[in-house]
Each structure stands twice: as C-alpha cells, then as structure tokens.
Amino acid sequence: MSDEIKLKWGSDGLCCRGCGRQDHQLNTYDYLADIPGNEEESDLVEVQFKNTRKGYYRNSNHIPLEKGDIVAVEASPGHDIGVVTLMGRLVPLQMRKANLRSDAEIKRIYRKAKAVDMEKYEEAKKREHETMIRSRQIANDLNLNMKIGDVEFQGDGNKAIFYYIADERVDFRQLIKVLAEAFRVRIEMRQIGARQEAGRIGGIGPCGRELCCATWMTNFVSVATSAARFQDLSLNPQKLAGQCAKLKCCLNYEVDIYVEAMKRLPSKEIVLETKDGEYFFFKSDILKGMVTYSTDKHVAANLVELTARRAFEVISMNRRGEKPENLNEDGEVEEKRPVDLLEQENINRFDRAKKKKKKKGGGNKQVAKQPDEVPQAVSNPQRENRGKKHQNGNRGGNNHRKPQTGNNGEKTE
C-alpha cells in the first residue's frame, strides 16, 4: 500500500477523510470528501464548539484548513476557539438545513489557533464547573424557579453562556447583574429543555445502551401517550419515563408499524354474533394478527382467540344475517397455549428422571461399567455353544488339541 493511500485510508480499511473530530449527535459524514476540488468549491466552513454548539464561518483569508484543525473564529466580543468539522459543498446544504442563508452576514475565521490561544482556552474551561456551582447558589438566593444545567465560556474568556431549565417564565434581569459583577464577564442566558439537558449530561438507558439524545438525535419530537396506547403498553409513568422525566423518545420508533398492523384488525366496537351468543372484543396481539373475544363486555369470560381473517369472515356473515355455530373455524376448539412458564413444564419431570436412574442401578459407578458389560453379553452365547459341544462329545476330538512343545521347551496351544 502506497503512502498516498495510507493517508486516505485508515489502518482498519475505513475512509478517514469523510470523518472529522466530531462529538456525538453533531457527526456529519462528508461523502464528497474524495471528489477532487471539493474543499475549494466553497469558502464556508463548519466549526464545532463545546457540547452541541456549532456555527458556520467564512474563510475569507483563504487559510489552508483541514478537518480537525483548531481555529480562532470571530465572536462578539473577542474570539472563540473551535474545531473544523466540515468543508466544501456540503456546508451550504447544512446551513440550509439549519435555516441559515449563505448570503447573510457570516462571521469569519481569524487564524489557526496558536499556543497563546490554547492557554486562554484551557484557563477559561477550568472555570466552568466552579462558575456553574456558584451561579446555582446565586439563583437560589434570589428565589428563582430555575436550574442552571451547564456553563460554557468563550475561547478568550470574555463571555459565558449559562444554560438553564425552567418550567415557567423567569425574570432573571437581577440575576444577570449579579453574575456579571461576580465573574466579570459578559453573560448570555439560554433556555434548554429537559431532553436537551439529558443529552448534554449523558447516561445509560434501560436498554443497556447510551442515551439516544446523547449520541445521534439532533432534534426532539414530542412524544404523546397515544404512542404507548397503540403499542398496548401499560400507562405506567415509571416505565414510560426516561431519565429526563419525560416520555421516552424510543416510543415513537415503532408506532408507525403498529398503526399499519392495526389496520388489518377488526374494529374494537364490532360485536360478533353466533348461535351461542354475542362476543365482545377483549384484547389483540397486533403483530401476530390474533384477536381475543369474550362473552362479557367488561370481564374476561369464555375467552376465544381467533385470527383476524376468521374475525372478518364472521363479521361478513353477520352482515348477511347469518350466524356461525361458533367463532372457531370448522367447529374446532383451539388448544389453550400455556402463557406462564410454569404451565409449559411438568413439575413431575424430576420424579421421572429419578425412576430411570433407579432402574439402571443407581450409582454413577455402575453406569460407567455398562460399556464393558456389553461385549460380555455378546460373547456369552458362544461359551454356551462350546459347553453344549463338550457335552455332546464330538467325534475325533477336534475340539481338544494336544499341547505342542516349542523350541524353548514352552508349551503352546
């Protein structure tokens, strides 16, 4: 493999030019990275900052940049430090996705970050946790019904962004004055939701994997309780709520499949009529296409499980004024399938195993000797036949050989 190809491809054979130093849900794969002249197609550059913040800047000075370069960009006031994550033709498309116009006033990139810029950036980053703890105490002293979830300092340390959560409208004008006097920086307040806070903090979900909001989700769609009803899930808030105390985002993943499957089932309001009586809808297995009916409208009584096709057949017969003998096809009653694990196995199976061991003779030693006993049982009939021949007294004495003497005087047969 040549050196040029090694730069283009990683050691594991995956293309590295399309990937950059990106974090979590901000990842954008540049599928146009291998096209010649792609980076010179546009002077717009995507730059990512701490957490979920990224912006778009113009490389007006035509600085030779690559993905992963740390740059100093224009900010108000001063400058900020970020990482280049996307260049070329995809940047205008990403701006259009973010509802930003490419001909609007866009800030520019100053330079690649120097050692002095990185020192200021590291100093500002070390102040973030201490500032967050102290700002929470100040908000508590002012009796504000809000929670400050995170603090992000600008690269030069002249500005700080405070991310907060509040259920109601909060008047934090007095809070901004106190924070500005305490930290001597320009203050910016940004309100985020509970799902966004969970994504910034991260964690492990009940499925055993990292939270979706902290890995790949970029926008949060509202989740309604109807999503749980369509999937026949119990409306238990402790099971349906995620770590953000809101309904889990994964409830929306399979709703469309259940909605489509429900269209192939009969309506819950339709009553099936037979010669035995009326049957009311009780429950359904949407993915299997099975429907269960009961003779009582409110209580489970004389439950009958049948397929959706059979249910539609009975409905069409009722519309024609006909009533079948029963709900099952051809009058056959389906066997009740065990639902509980205890019903699937017979508890007496252990007793049967013990009886078999007793018949074999009990201990493990006798069982181990069985292979040796088998050839003896085969050879016993031959010995019996020899005994019979001796008793009959065969003529000539062919069965009795005289011992012969060898060279060494040993007797051989």
Image (cartoon, helix red, strand yellow):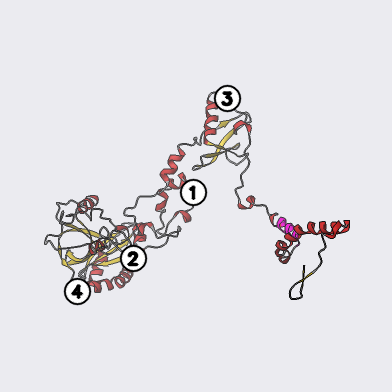
Numbered range of the magenta stretch: 351-361
Specify whether residue 277 is in view: no
Specify whether residue 222 is in view: yes
**Mark nearer the N terminus (3 vs 1):** 1
Residue at mark 4: 115
| Mark closer to the observer (2, 1) | 1
Residue at mark 2: 143
Toward the left, the furthest residue is: 61
**Label 3 Cα crowd, 10 Å radius (few <14 / some 14-19 / many 20+):** some
Toward the front, the furthest residue is: 407
Image location (x, y in percent) of residue 163: 29, 63
Q: Is residue 173 left or right of residue 207?
A: left
**Label 1 Cα crowd, 10 Å radius (few <14 / some 14-19 / many 20+):** some
**Label 4 Cα crowd, 10 Å radius (few <14 / some 14-19 / many 20+):** few
CA separation, marks 3 and 1? 36 Å
Residue at mark 3: 322
